[in-house]
Image: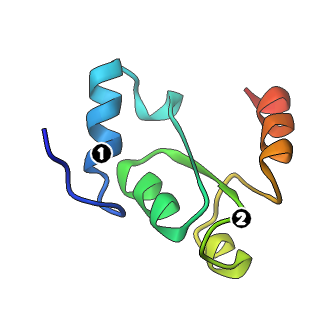
Amino acid sequence: MKCAPKPAPDMLLELMDHLDTPPERTLMIGDTTHDLQMAASAGVAGVGVLHGAHPEEQLAALDPLALLPSTQALAAWLRANA
């Protein structure tokens, strides 16, 4: 099935449906505002990683659970919070 592009939530909602995973058990990790907007629109938590196209201030404005400087920091955050 073809989905609307980000930031529309369609792709994430379809994956959640396919995996039978509720929003409260889903985490969207992304490096753009489109990723975090998609998470919010799908009703799931989002975590931002600061190596994408959008600056920290724009990602922070979308109120992610965490805003991390690298994929290494993401791995550590996941170990501590999963």
Q: Position of residue 30 (x, y in %)?
A: 58, 54
User: In the visual, does 78 lie left or right of 37?
Assistant: right
Could you tell me the amino acid type at mark 1? Answer: Met
Q: Tell me which numbered mark, 2 or 1, is placed earlier along the sequence.
A: 1
- For image coordinates 81% across by 54% down, the residue present is 70
Quadrant including the C terminus? top right
Nearest to the observer: residue 55 or residue 41: 55
- For image coordinates 19% across by 49% down, the residue present is 3
Residue holding disc 1: 11
- For image coordinates 61% across by 76% down, the residue present is 54
For label 1, count other residues whose C-alpha is less than 10 Å away and answer few (under 14), some (14-19) or many (20+).
some
Nearest to the observer: residue 45 or residue 4: 4
Q: Is residue 78 above or below residue 35?
A: above
Residue holding disc 2: 51
Element type at mark 1: helix
Q: Position of residue 41 (x, y in %)?
A: 37, 57
For label 2, count other residues whose C-alpha is less than 10 Å away and answer few (under 14), some (14-19) or many (20+).
some
User: In the visual, does 78 lie left or right of 54?
Assistant: right
Tell me the CA gap for discs 2 and 1.
22 Å
Q: Is residue 75 above or below residue 9?
A: above
Residue lying furthest top = 20
